[in-house]
Image: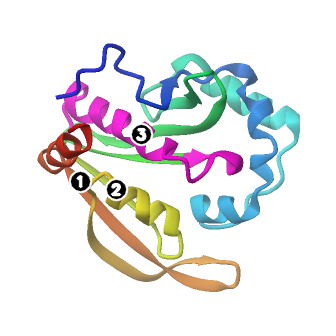
């Protein structure tokens, strides 16, 4: 099991509640069309600063955790580097999913994997879920690498189910049981 003194902190980052003013740091990344396509499987309409501010205000301070539990990811120095959330919570079957986004200038530094490990520990050890289901478009190499780094198993592929940028793409399905995560996390913490 995890033994860090502060549950929400890893070696490089910590998870915290979203603050109303986090939108300012995200504004530039909201215009990253390629990242938005990989996350949302299509283009989003442009967002004004007012809309971004309104969205972050709605998410701030864990106002509604019934559909999503949203966190900001920040370095130990307090620099905002991204966000992560739990969604698709199925209490009956003990499953959940997650979404994650690391801001452009912070990608490739291991922040996402560390944040995901913390989130998975919370889902498995505090919320009593038994499995995390996830997926990504087959061209999202960063997401595939992230899933595999924490122990997710590729469970299947839905061919040509995602349409964006004038093409059809495959949807890769991943799964991770609590036991699989424990084994992977034990090796990570060794």
Question: With respect to residue 13, does 132 lie above or below?
Answer: below
> Given this view, does label 1 or label 3 mark the residue nearer the observer?
3
According to the picture, the residue beneath numbered tag 2 turns out to be 149
Q: With 37 as the anchor, is 190 left or right in this view?
A: left
| Residue 93 seen | no
Tell me which residue sits at (80%, 31%) in the image.
24
Residue 99 or residue 44, whichever sits in front = 99
Please provide the residue range marked out in magenta: 101-130
Give the structural element (helix, strand or loop) at label 1. strand
Say whether marks 1 and 3 touch (CB < 8 Å).
no
Q: With 104 as the anchor, is 142 left or right in this view?
A: left
* In magenta segment, residue 115: yes
Q: Position of residue 176 (x, y in %)?
A: 23, 53
Give the structural element (helix, strand or loop) at label 2. helix
Q: Residues within 10 Å of mark 1 (few under 14, many from 20)?
A: many
Say whether marks 1 and 2 touch (CB < 8 Å).
no
Q: With 139 as the anchor, is 35 left or right in this view?
A: right
Tag of residue 114: 3
Residue 177 or residue 9, whichever sits in front = 9
Image quadrant occupied by the C terminus: top left
């Amino acid at each position: 099991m995890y033994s860090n003194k502060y549950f929400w902190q890893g070696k490089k980052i910590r998870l915290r509640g979203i603050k109303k003013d986090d939108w300012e740091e995200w504004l530039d990344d909201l215009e990253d069309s390629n990242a938005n396509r990989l996350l949302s499987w299509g283009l989003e309409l442009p967002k004004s600063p007012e809309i971004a501010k309104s969205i972050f205000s709605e998410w701030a301070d864990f106002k509604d955790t019934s559909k999503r539990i949203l966190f900001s990811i920040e370095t130990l120095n307090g620099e905002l580097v991204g966000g992560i959330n739990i969604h698709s919570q199925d209490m009956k079957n003990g499953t959940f999913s997650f979404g994650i986004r690391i801001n452009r200038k912070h990608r490739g530094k291991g922040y996402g994997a560390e944040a995901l490990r913390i989130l998975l520990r919370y889902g498995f050890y505090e919320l009593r879920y038994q499995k995390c289901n996830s997926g990504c478009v087959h061209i999202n190499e960063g997401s595939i690498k992230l899933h595999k780094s924490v122990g997710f198993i590729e469970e299947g592929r839905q061919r040509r189910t995602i349409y964006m940028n004038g093409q059809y793409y495959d949807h890769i399905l991943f799964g991770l049981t609590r036991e699989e995560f424990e084994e992977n996390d034990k090796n990570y913490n060794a």
